[in-house]
Image (spheres, grey):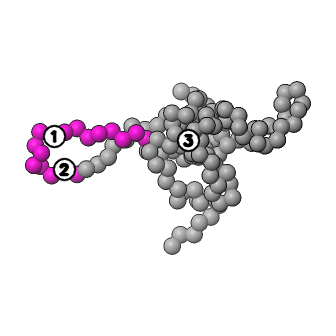
Amino acid sequence: MIGITADNKLKRLIVVGDRVLIKPKDPTDRTLSGLYLPPTVQEKEQVQAGHVIKVGPGYPIPSPMEDEPWKETEEKVKYMPLQAQEGDVALYLQRNAIDLEYEGEKYVIVPQGSILMLERLEDL
């Protein structure tokens, strides 16, 4: 049996469907004018940012119907991949995010449709 270490603990997680696992960035605790905001106010902001950790397989695509229904076929599910990729920085709507804690770290799971914008290090 393989032991779980800090570098492979997230490999056990499988994100399902069109969902994305995001590690939220630490929000700044001070406004531009210098006021300090409590964490509850920062967490209720409509748009949040974070790093994409894992992505699901995408949207399932129905398989085409064959002309020979008696023929046994192997049912393989095909997916349309998501735009988000591991390592991207995502701006997402907080109201659609599901907060969770795993191994002492805070993460959010959001559907692909709740991601407003992605920042990728490589050129498009």
Q: Position of residue 63 (x, y in %)?
A: 26, 40
Q: Per the image, is 64 magenta?
A: yes
Residue under label 1: 66
Is the residue under label 2 in contact with that under label 1 (CB below 8 Å)? yes
Gap between marks 1 and 2 measured at Cα? 9 Å
Q: Amino acid at mark 1?
A: Glu
Q: Amino acid at mark 2?
A: Thr
Q: Position of residue 51 (x, y in %)?
A: 63, 41
Locate residue 66: give its quadrant: top left
Residue under label 2: 73
Q: Amino acid at mark 3?
A: Val
Q: Is residue 27 in view?
A: no
Q: Residue at x 50, y 43 (%)?
A: 19
Q: Residue at x 22, y 38 (%)?
A: 64
Q: Is residue 81 in view?
A: yes
Q: Residue at x 36, y 41 (%)?
A: 60
Residue under label 3: 110
Q: Position of residue 1 (x, y in %)?
A: 51, 73
Q: Residue at x 71, y 37 (%)?
A: 44
- 1 vs 3, front mark: 3
Which segment did they paint magenta? 58-74
Question: Is the magenta region chiefly helix, strand or loop?
Answer: loop
